[in-house]
Amino acid sequence: MSNISAQEVQYNKSGQKIVSPDYLLFEAPREKFFMTGSEAVKEAVKRASVDASVSYPITPQSEAAHLIGELWVEGYVGVYFRGESEFGVMSEVAGCALAGARTITTTSGPGTLRAFENFPMWAGTRIPVQLVLMARGVNAPLSIQPDNLEVGFLLDTGCMIWYAENAQDLFDMILAGFAVAEHPSVHVPVITVVDGFFVSHTREAIMLPPEDIALPPYNPYKAPMPVIDLEAPPGRFLRDPFVMKSNYISYATHASWQFEVRAAIERSRPYAKHYLRGLIEEFGNPDAEIVFVATGTAASQAKEAVRLLKDEEGVDAKVVKLKTIRPFPEEELKVATKNAKYIFVPEFNVVGWLEREVRKVLYKHSDAEIIGTPRVAGGMTMPAEVIVSEVMNNLRVK
Amino acid sequence: MAKLGPMGFSPYPAAVKEGVLNPPEGKALLFDEMVDEEIAMKKAARAMLTRENPTIFPGPQVLYAWSEDAKKKAKLIKELADVFGAKIIPMYDYRPKYPKINPEVEINPNHPNLTIWHNNIKACIFVGVHCHYANVALKIIRAETDCFTIALCSMEGHEDAMITLRDQHPSELEKFIEIAKEVKRELDK
């Protein structure tokens, strides 16, 4: 697309030049900006030819939702309104997507749980909705601090789950998310997770392509189910309200349907690998015997711990950052940990959902000791020094 | 890998769980092997010409004249059925039917095995069926029957079929018809 001729230039409804996802993500010139994660969401949505967005306020995603509303005012988003609750939002988002709209929404913490029934429904209806989840955790008494417990609940909803480390990741993942989720053979929702506050509310340098280019519009007629189109016969009567008549569906169908949704996530692997430049990222000494497996901010902190371990303790270590949780980068993790003697899984939640995932994948594939620490929750920070201290304490005990 | 013959009662097999993904552009999938499109077309034609009660299952995307491509494809599919001497049983509605479908005249993605059992179909072609419903049905067929399944997909393919041909538009269907005629001559039919 970079050598596109004048005759071939096409524009979306907002008047932006349509370019390929490859051009937008890899080839377009980029300029440096200083902005928050919430502002990065706005910049990504601005370039994503989004048809519809529905919002509901909940900390820490409220600002991102608000900024998408500003895009509607500016003419970059086709439809924007506030739902009655998170359950309402996720249902309304489904309606928009079933009608053929490229749709995005945002939520956090308890909002995720209030909306929860909709996530497997999204996956089962094969809609490529994108949810930007600014993780905040779930607790009573109510916490509004950084924590990613809710991600553990989402793992088996049939949605793809990607995890951004910083504002740059988030910007790129939102655009890549649509490109991957809308492949006809994939066509399941993508939940793009980022740690609330740490990323949503802090400013950092981010490289952005020009704002006058955007993704090609979504083509709902390539969807794996008929789009609801009252004018076109294949869609006009082929889709019942989703739950009705479900008792007339054979058990075989219910089983096959669920396998098919999971199969769709597996089919996303090659596309996600392409647009995310791999499902994992490694940082540090590739041959290190101490390995951190982490996502999001925990990966950032682990990277700093790798530097401290080398500079202050003379210990080699590396970080394996997981960019996708669904699909889980199983083969990549096995290869990346083949020299490991100790695998630490630092996490911002009380249950250690990532440690469970890592243990499952590496069971009988690694002799390394897997240590689910450090683990913080409820808004605690995870200083790199704490990670170093955990490593050194474990090594001394051994 | 999609194998021919019943795979068992449950769980319903999904080829991706065995590491089989759809073919890349320009290629086809023959069981778990990536092959050139012509090779897959020849194998598909042979299956349709040699197995009992070959049947084409056209879906809404070719049953309704909603685009010029759909109209062209519909005519070509009838021609293809003539070459194979195959029956055409439509998958015209994805909704489950109460109390049951008539397997003589229709196939439904929610229990495609009923139509295959009833008509003793040993080879079939899915064409014009929306990908999700084709995938749901193909998994059930693979689990419950010994029918040889062939998918002619206008999108990215169906790895649960024994043969999957992707990006199948009118020009590819014309090519398939020519290959089918050639294989028929070779078989002296």
Image (cartoon, rainbow, N blue to C red):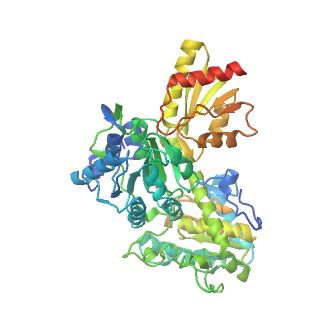
Q: Nearer the viewer, residue B113 or B60?
A: B113
Q: Up-down: is B26 above or below A95?
A: above
Extreme-front residue of the structure? A141
Q: Nearer the viewer, residue A114 or B170?
A: A114
How far across and how far down the image is residue B172, in percent? 54, 63
Tell me what residue is drawn at x 65 percent, y 42 percent. Answer: A356
Tell me what residue is drawn at x 50 percent, y 23 percent. Answer: A304
| Residue A116 appears in the picture as rendered | yes
How far across and how far down the image is residue A308, in percent? 53, 18
**What number of labels is visible?**
0
How far across and how far down the image is residue B189, in percent? 72, 76
Identify the image quadrant of residue A389: top right
Q: Nearer the viewer, residue A98 or B48?
A: A98
**In the image, A83: left or right of A241?**
left
Looking at the rendering, in which quadrant would you find the N terminus of chain A?
Answer: top left
Identify the image quadrant of residue B141: bottom right
Looking at the rendering, in which quadrant would you find the C terminus of chain A?
Answer: top right
| Residue B185 appears in the picture as rendered | no
Tell me what residue is drawn at x 48 percent, y 62 percent. Answer: A118
Q: Up-down: is B103 above or below B178?
A: below
Q: Up-down: is A231 above or below A384?
A: below
Tell me what residue is drawn at x 60 percent, y 77 percent. Answer: A247
Identify the image quadrant of residue A259: bottom right
How far across and how far down the image is residue A11, in percent? 28, 52
